[in-house]
Amino acid sequence: MSQLVTLHEFIMARQADFPFASGELSRLLSDIAVASKMVSMDVRRAGLVDHILGAEGNTNVQGEEQQKLDVVADNHFINLFKAGGEVCGIASEENDDYLPFKSQKSRDGKYVVLFDPLDGSSNIDVNVSIGTIFSVYRRKSKTGEEANLQDMLQAGHEQVAAGYVVYGSSTMLVYTTGRGVNGFTLDPLIGEFCLSHPDMKMPENGRIYAINEGNINICNPGLKKYVQTYCQQTREGASRPYSGRYIGSLVADFHRTLIKGGIYVYPSTTTDPEGKLRLLYECNPIAFIAEQAGGLATTGVERVMEIQPERLHQRIPFYVGSKTMMKQAMACLEKDGPESI
Ligand code: AHM
Ligand code: MG
């Protein structure tokens, strides 16, 4: 039997690789792990909360107001970050504006975190996998001051860490600090994330495409051509076309793409010209992980992590996946009708 390595042990061992590290990023990653265990517990009880303890917006048996699970998840992360003191402010999909933390301890924190506390939350009602996605940046403002908007609007290539947690048939945390990608599965018996997927690599090619095909006639012609010619036709040497798989939870669709290879696309459409996914909370962290695992992430036009964000809730068209499939999709876009952003 190989030795069990907990996330905590792994983070501490990695910290020793950086002789001048102060341990703040390590503590921050540990806080994220603790918050995601709390969310995992809530997700496991979601059906009970809705159907037995009282629906959202109602009062539960204890007479307390029920909150939506995304708000509950948001609060778990915010509370842990405030208590930890490594983070001077956050921005999340659940909040209209960024939140600078006021205490002196937090104002001395080096980092900001941008996150989507519960991605794919429309899947909660039907018991399908959902996730948390996070990005960590070093602050731009002076230590000791309040975090500001410029701390939040950093390009993806400035991320110091990024990851996601998928609340699936098991709960898994996958993260990178720019030195490869590692995955940890939550062992519910001991309540610890344990290293289960060391040094994850995305296959160079794949046979699975993930796109909401209901949108195929309102997206650009280049993407339609790619899907029809590369994904839906039996190509030489293959026994059948590619498989379409679309969970509708970015984290779960991407997790499969990372492990099995494939391509995930949420393009611009005539109804949503900027696409749907948020640059800061969804695309940048997933792009960082994809690239660290050997994949690519673009808007169909440019590398996601090069974009200088202009707004907190900015959306972009998003293409991510195995190198070969991404290159083929990008070539179709160039030739048959580009993404517009
Ligand atoms: P959310 O952040 O409001 O949950 O929306 C993001 C989700 C992604 O997880 C998923 O890939 C996509 O929206 C699905 O959208 P659609 O139903 O339009 O295909
Ligand atoms: Mg989301």
Image: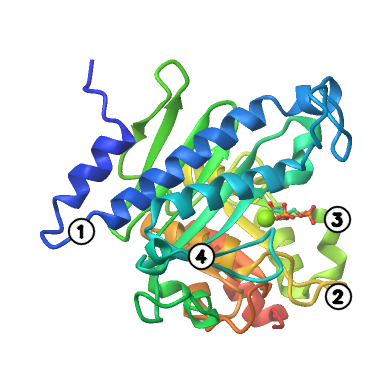
Q: Amino acid at mark 3?
A: Gly
Labels 2, 1: front one: 1
- Judged from the image, the secondary structure of the residue bearing numbered disc 4 is loop
Q: Amino acid at mark 1?
A: Ser
* Residues marked 1 and 3 touching at CB (< 8 Å): no
Q: Which mark is residue 22?
A: 1
Q: Secondary structure at mark 2?
A: loop
Which comes sooner in the sequence, label 3 or label 2? 3
* Label 3 beta carbon within 8 A of ligand 1: yes
Q: CA distance from mark 1 to mark 3?
A: 49 Å
Which residue reaches farthest left?
19
Give the mark, 4 or 2, whose residue is nearer the N terminus. 4
Mark number displayed over residue 6 = none
What residue is at 48 percent from the left and 75 percent from the top? 147
Q: Nearer the viewer, residue 305 or 331?
A: 305
Residue 270: mark in rendering: 2
**How far is disc 1 from disc 4 in space, using C-alphas?**
21 Å
Of the 4 image quadrants, the one containing the C terminus is bottom right
Label 3: element kind:
helix
10 Å crowding of disc 4: few (<14), some (14-19), many (20+) = many
In three-dimensional space, the C-alpha distance between marks 3 and 4, rounded to whole angstroms, equals: 42 Å
Q: Ligand 1 lies in which image quarter?
A: bottom right
The answer to whether marks 4 and 2 mark residues whose Cβ atoms lie closer than 8 Å is no
| Rendered image: mark on residue 101 | 4
Find residue 13 and report its horizontal and vertical position in percent: 18, 43
Look at label 4 and name its amino acid: Phe
Question: Label 4 to label 2, Cα distance in Å?
Answer: 39 Å
Chain-order first, disc 1 or disc 4: 1
